[in-house]
Amino acid sequence: MGTTAASATDNEQIHFRTCTLCEAMCGIEIKHDGEKVLSIKGDKNDPFSQGYICPKATALQDLYEDPDRLRGPVERTADGWKSISWIEALDKVAAGIQSVQQKYGQNAFGVYLGNPNVHNMGGMLTIKQLLTSLKTRSRFSATSIDQLPHHIVSMHLFGHMLRIPVPDVNRTQYMLIIGGNPLASNGSIMTAPNMRQKLKDIKARDGKVVVIDPRRTETADIASEHHFIRPATDVLLLLAMLNEIYAQGYAKVDSRVAGLAPEIDRIASFAEGFTPESVADITGITAAEIKRIVKEFCEAESSVCYGRMGISVQEFGLLSQYLSMVINIVTGRLDEVGGLMFPNPAVDVVNSSGPGYLGKRHSRVSNLPDFNGEYPVVAMADEMLVAGEGQLKGFMSVAGNPVLSTPNGEKLDEALSGLEFMVSLDYFVTETSRHANIILPPVSPLERDHYDITFNGFAVHNVAKYSPALFSKTENEKHDWEIYLELADRLDKDAPEAVQKERAATKAFGPKFLLEQGLKYGPYKDVTLDALIDNPHGIDLGPLHRMLPEAIKHADKQINLNVDFYQADLERIKEMMQQYDNQEILLIGRRHVRSNNSWLHNSYRLVKGKSRCTLMLHPETAAQHGIEDGQDVRVTSRVGSVVIAAEVTDELMPGVVSIPHGFGHGRKGVKQKIAQAHAGVSVNDLTDDTLIDQLSGNAAVNGVPVQLEALGANADNVANAVLENSIDSIDSAIA
């Protein structure tokens, strides 16, 4: 058990740690009696979050206590799931993987890494052992669902895929947020607890917060101003802004940072022809408003342009993120107080990992580029379904639920059902893991040590914090890192001596052995593991500060703008403008502060109350389709159809509809009682796996064309028929 503070009663103890259920790294104070959690609240002495927590934090208790959570390995049999020993499970998994690879080749076995992996110290520090032992090039991850553009831009410009600058929100005077909703996400590639207060603080110091989004989000509600924009047209807005910056003489090409970018002069003509007037009709933002935003952004004492989810997950996601970065550079806002700045974490994974690469190989069926050894997730189902040399016959999902989280989930669902062998590392029998032959469950977050390997690298203030496990695991439980190492031992018995020594040391001392090494070679010599243990609330390492040129990982310490690569995508933009149909109904996703993708829906306190899985649409759009509030609507895209209740609201701009991400728990075989009772529908049964950002391979899940059909009195019967996926039932219900 971890170190606890003294308490008022013999029984009651207090444990301090970091919440690991989203990116925000909030400090929490957990009261417990050694066996049970008594309460969870914000840690007022945490130097980063200062007592703030969102509602998700309490779900740490729910996850630990969840009766549906698997506590040991299970095997799928003709009579249902059967408990088996760890030795038998690991032996069978290793044998299953080896059988597939011996029959069909090493790359016939694939692996998918889900989002929760990055919230896990042990997993992050040891996952390479598992991946190396699998010896497959068929790798996929959640990265190419929503954030791949960030990594490619940072790799190109700064020499490393993880060298990502973040908004200095604590000191900026003007924050332009395009396609981001940090009040729901608590940041997102910007680790920032209590964004509500941070945005209020900007306004309180006479600054301004401007939000561009097709939906008036929680963030837009408290912003200084909000502008609706047609989904997936953000790239045109950014091009027009860049054009206007040069037209009005706001470009600071003689600034300190501009001097580090040899190609900076070429940016002057990059957006030539993309005037505010030329994009106004398509984007839905007037030329006058675009010009005013540019003027205010450039004339503010400090400002920052932050583009996130909404601009990443569209057909021009990579170019959009590039333009966002370029706007910050040419206006002199990169590496300046109140602008876009680089965190300086105590464990800098940039220095211990490769820079990344794009397009060394291409996927077999769809010919999409790999990034850092991973193919885009949109290629995954076809790699399983399309016969031929290299077809995936076996698969491993690690802390992921791609049936609900990747485009065209129905197609992937079908693909997984046809595999010869599958293994899942998961707490639950989910929409994805139900296809596995064997499920290997790791311990819950409260049973493992924690240090934020990933999110300190995106933090808006430099901090460091280590949390020992609150509860000890039982004899029949294993940490994820133990599972990785034991599988690696079985799959790769002839690994080099150095690898075997690292495995042995990690097994003996746990991943904190690797953490100590990371701290030792980090930038703060007094931040040791012992120092972190002595400071359970965390250590304040100070505000963001100038990091250039030292932070650049290119050998010449220059910013490589890679203009030719990005400029080549402008032809695709011009084609889009010529063919644009502003009459289409476009689908976007949305987030909620009580949710994190699909993996917190089995917590009653997070899903209770009014259903959040609704089809949001504007009154004008509703009237055009004869839809009333609360009425069931059939939403159809190229790939599928769902039935969902309408929520008529002026939060959405006309012509846009929204369904939240992560629901769809009504599939047979799922063993999560609360999630199933609040099943909802999966937005990814509508998103299109052929709708992608061609430049990066990232999924384009925003801006999906859909059709709407109001359902009448027989709506309930039709909805049930859809869930059962029975054509006969549907025909009968309509008749």
Image (cartoon, rainbow, N blue to C red):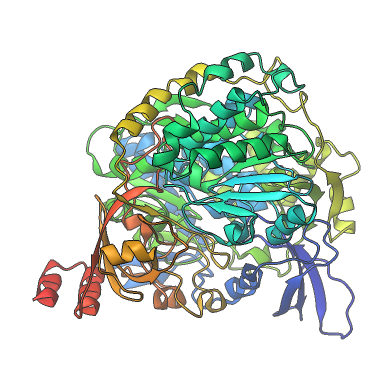
Q: In this view, does 462 lie above or below 410?
A: above
Residue 101 lies in what quarter of the image? top left
Residue 8, by quadrant, is: bottom right
- Tally the numbered discs: 0
Q: Is residue 557 visible?
A: no
- The residue nearer to you, when weighing 272 against 213, is 272
Left or right: 287 as drawn, with respect to 169: left
- Judged from this view, the residue extending furthest toward the left is 735
- 655 relative to 184 in the view: left or right: left
Quadrant containing the N terminus is: bottom right
- 107 vs 455: above or below: above
- Give the percent coordinates (x, y) of residue 348: 74, 38
Residue under the point 43% across and 42% down: 283
Residue 401 placement: quadrant? bottom left
Q: In this view, does 539 lie to the left or right of 273?
A: right
- Compared to residue 343, the image places residue 665 above or below, namely below
Direction from residue 12 to residue 340 in the image, left or right = left
Q: Which residue is drawn at 78% across and 55% down?
A: 466
Q: Which of 557 and 30 is in front in this view?
A: 557
* Residue 579 location (% of width, % of height): 28, 34
Q: Looking at the picture, tell me which residue is in the foreground, 589 or 66.
A: 589
Q: Is residue 658 above or below residue 546?
A: below
Image point (66%, 33%), residue name = 163
Q: Where is residue 563 in the image (x, y as percent from the top left)?
A: 53, 19
Quadrant, the C terminus: bottom left
Q: Which residue lies furthest to the front in this view?
A: 288
Percent position of residue 281, x then y: 40, 40
Please say whether residue 353 is visible from this viewpoint. Answer: yes
